[in-house]
Image: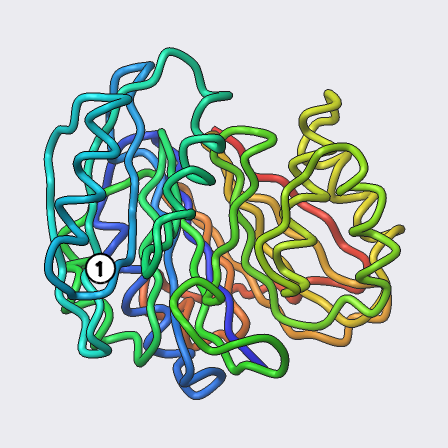
Amino acid sequence: MCGIAGLLYKDKKTHNVGKEMTDMLHSLQHRGPDSAGFSIYGGLELADNQYELNVELKNKPGLLNQLKTTLTQITPIFNEQTFNSPDGYIIYRCIIKLDKYELLEALIQNLNRIEDLRVINGSHSFEMIKDVGLVKDIAERYDIKSIKGTHAIGHTRFATESTIDRYHAHPYQSYITPDITVVHNGQITNYWKIRDPLERKGHHFESNNDTECIVHYIADKLHEGYKLEEALEDAVEDLDGPFSLLVGTPNGIGIAKDKLGLRPGVMAENDEVFAIASEEMALQDVMETDHVEQIAPGEVRAYTM
């Protein structure tokens, strides 16, 4: 079933997006108790050559030091944070420096070769937080309510395929185009038809989750010069199955729904904010909803700043 939500402030300034997205996803908790996740844009304010890494590693002696040693052979480390998870893992977050963005994916693949360690994500203009469990518990663990931003997308998951763990929680990210993330409610039935040509073009898949396939598809279109709305229009044509999806970019949010309209979605806006969610109750957490629009079958929209 799953629940998706998105929020964008039109003034391009940072607001309490972490708290508001937490409230929206909590209202959608009944749609997915397995895991939840956030992509919060606009609050990191990193230098051009800086990136945030999020890494999960087993809480065992020496592993965190091994990670740091490997990193410091490549980059200085800034702003370290650690979060303890009830499943026996540590989440390590830090800022690194790289000469160019293209080095980020190679670094992540190198780190993933370390036993009992996995990189959740690396990013420049957004913070990704995702974990197994309920929205409120995850928000408290990572202090999400204190995170400010200009816009965000989020997800609460009812797993119908692939593993229930931290990595398989949404959002998903592609490194072909910087800082593109996707959350999705539904199922892509022609998954392999979409995935095969993307892999031949150099996209690296880490799972069999269809949301990862969507984010690679969108990122590939953007890499080829498509505008976000154009990429979403092609997605409606090319992706089979029932879906509602949200795309997060450094400049805004994109929306697409399958042609048959088999997955729910509503949206509302005023002079200050645009919000979208699987159900109206989540919109009511962030704004007055006197006028709510249903996302029409096959509809595509892009809200950019």
- Establish if 77 lies above or below 128: above
Find residue 6 and report its horizontal and vertical position in percent. Answer: 46, 55
Label 1 crowd bin: few (<14), some (14–19), many (20+), radius 10 Å: some
Name the foreground residue: 2 vs 278. 2
Name the foreground residue: 87 vs 126. 87
Residue 110: which quarter of the image?
top left
Give the colour scheme shown: rainbow
Find residue 118 and report its horizontal and vertical position in percent. Answer: 37, 54
Find residue 215 and report its horizontal and vertical position in percent. Answer: 63, 47
Name the foreground residue: 138 vs 289. 138
Q: Is residue 215 left or right of residue 5?
A: right
Residue 24: which quarter of the image?
bottom left
Find residue 258 and report its horizontal and vertical position in percent. Answer: 79, 63
**Which residue occupies 54% across, 59% down?**
183
- Establish if 133 lies above or below 5: below
**Which residue occupies 89% across, 51% down?**
237
**Which residue occupies 18% across, 53% down?**
63
Q: Is residue 10 left or right of residue 176?
A: left
- Name the quadrant of the N terminus: bottom right
Instruction: Identify the element where label 1 is drawn.
Output: helix
Q: Which residue is mark 1?
A: 19
Q: Is residue 58 left or right of residue 2?
A: left
How many numbered discs sit on the rendered protein? 1
Name the foreground residue: 149 vs 155. 155
**Which residue occupies 60% across, 63% down?**
184
Amino acid type indicated by mark 1: Lys
